[in-house]
Amino acid sequence: MPEFPAIGRRALRQGRVSIPGQVYLLTTTTYRRQRLFADPMRARIASGVIHSASTWGDAGLLAWVLMPDHWHGLLQLGNESLARAMNRFKGNLTRTLNASSEVHQRVWDRGFHDHALRADEDVRQAARYIVANPIRAGLARSALDYPYWNAIWLDPDAQPLLS
């Protein structure tokens, strides 16, 4: 695999376009890649915030996985910007974690990586890729063995935004 130069956060934002209805594959890492979510209590608290509809505003979270040092999500954007949706998510989760502990700490690195799914990319395949992350990382033998993930296709009451 070729090595690419470190281009920095600014370059990640250049060309970022927020398109209502677009599905994005998102990744954000914990501050200094600390394994904050290896702690089951923190992971459960974080999972509750991630699963909460109020975290996402008018966007729809289609699938997600919380890893010890990062988070992946598949988000269908509503009318607000991708940056605003991610800032709300990271802020809500940080505030909730810090409120549950006597130790207040920085949770997330700045910025995030996004990939807008193209028309020829299968949304469900992207979701499978996300939820298989713990298997590839050696944390579980199957997705069912790992507790910190979800996908709308498993929830009969979910209201997907996809048309």
Image (tube, rainbow, N blue to C red):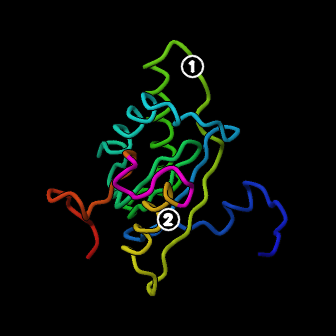
Indicate the amino acid at tag 2.
Leu
The extreme bottom residue here reads 120
Q: Is residue 60 left or right of residue 32?
A: left
* Residue that label 2 marks: 25
- Residues in magenta, as a range: 136-146
How many numbered discs, if any?
Answer: 2
Name the image quarter holding residue 144: bottom left
**Local crowd size for mark 1, using a 10 Å CA cut-off: few (<14), some (14–19), many (≥20):** few
The extreme front residue here reads 141
State the residue at coordinates (52%, 47%).
67
Image quarter (top left, top right, bottom left or bottom right) of the N terminus: bottom right
* Circle nearer the N terminus (1, 2): 2
State the residue at coordinates (69%, 61%).
12
Indicate the amino acid at tag 1.
His
Q: Position of residue 56 (x, y in %)?
A: 36, 49
State the residue at coordinates (44%, 36%).
43
* Residue that label 1 marks: 104
- Taking the magenta stretch, the answer to whether it contains residue 19 is no
